[in-house]
Amino acid sequence: MKKILLVAAFVCTGVAFFASFVFADGGCMDEDYKAAAESMRKGKEAEKAGNLLYAYLYYTPDWCATEAMAREGWEGRKRIAKVMAKKAEAKGLFYSTDDIFAGTPDATCEKAYKHSMDHMSDPDSSENPYMKNKPLGLCDGSNKLSFNDKASAFAWYEGNGLFVEADDCVMKYARKNTTEYVAVDVAAKHFIKRKAKVGGEDALKEYKFNAAYVDELTGMARKNALAELETEKRVYNKVADMMTERLSPEALKRAKDWTLIFGDPLLETVKDTAVKRGDEVFLTQGDAPMTFMRVFRYYDIAERKDKEKTARDKAEKLGDKAEKAGEFVSAYEYYGLSGNKAKMNAVKPKAETENKKKGSDAVKKSKDSIDKIQKKDTDKKKFEKEADDLEKELGI
């Protein structure tokens, strides 16, 4: 009879639980097959009784089984996965990276784990007394496993070989969040990775890749990129302060991110717009440090190192000019923008001294203002007292 060694592995990768089949020609005793058959029987009983956790674990025996038994267990887990996935979908949990299992500390599992460690080298050790009438996989070390309420439908389907259903859940997740970059990007990466594996793994031999999903996601990404370009147009001419000046480059950056998901040719439009904005700001907005910061954001989005270098060279010249004029704080700032750390560090002590002096002057000015206010307040009180005394003299 053809034999199969069923290797159960709880893999906490944030996606699911996998059980893989390793075919072997021998090494299994009659009692091993009997134990596997008993595990299948208990799995059916648990499933019929509605104890899906026990059923799922019994359907994953950690010992030898015939190929027929292994397939039976595999189909049993698929049935349970479909039930649990439907529950997750009903809660709106289409996609997440949460594992289908959750573990909590458990006294019985801790005792079972200690017993296993103590008898690991004893080939004649009897069944673990703490796991009697319990599936072996119920304990993960000293933790007791349960189905994770946060597990998504995708995790259940993907972890049990239901790849078409898993794809559907990824798309439901993306359609629910069409303007959310993370959702669309996750879906795109899923299908790009899936397409690369088609035909390359046993589990995917009968899987049919749905290219229409990629087309739909590509449309979502482009629509969002175009929307961000429109947003950038609206906000570009409304720069009024440090907050609003960031809106235009941020919109372009988001547009760029959307185009990069599938390599949309619209990327060139984004870059051209960024260059145009950077050039305009550089030529018309003066030489304030904030201007250079805006310019660098645009040229970074456009990936134009040449234009960025031109701007940094100008910042360095302004630093030289400021240093020559004795404006060391400004020089330090411009050198920082230019990227010339040597000049920046050289002028730093003078800049710090200038800052201290400015701070001292500011404190003195503030103290003078306070003294004036206090003097006015004292004079006012003195006047009010004199007025009161005069009123008393006059009998008012």
Image (tube, rainbow, N blue to C red):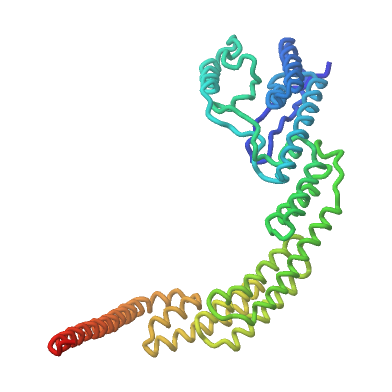
- The answer to whether residue 381 is left or right of residue 175 is left
| Residue occupying the point 86% across, 54% down | 212
Q: Quadrant of residue 37?
A: top right
Query: Farthest residue toward the front?
Result: 395
| Residue occupying the point 53% across, 76% down | 242
- In the picture, the quarter occupied by the N terminus is top right
Q: Is residue 51 above or below residue 366?
A: above
Q: Quadrant of residue 30?
A: top right
User: Could you tell me if residue 93 is visible in this image?
Assistant: yes
| Residue occupying the point 80% across, 28% down | 75
Q: Position of residue 196 (x, y in %)?
A: 79, 49
- In the picture, the quarter occupied by the C terminus is bottom left
Please tell me how many numbered marks the rendered image carries.
Answer: 0
Q: Position of residue 292 (x, y in %)?
A: 54, 80
- The answer to whether residue 150 is left or right of residue 242 is right
| Residue occupying the point 67% across, 76% down | 274
User: Could you tell me if residue 6 is visible in this image?
Assistant: no
Q: In this view, does 182 lie above or below 206?
A: below
- The answer to whether residue 5 is left or right of residue 246 is right
Residue in the foreground of this view, choosing between 141 and 106? 106
Residue in the foreground of this view, choosing between 19 and 314? 19
Query: Farthest residue toward the left?
Result: 393
Q: In this view, does 389 lie above or below 83?
A: below
Q: Quadrant of residue 366?
A: bottom left
Q: Is residue 236 above or below residue 37?
A: below
Q: Where is residue 252 in the image (x, y as percent from the top left)?
A: 67, 71
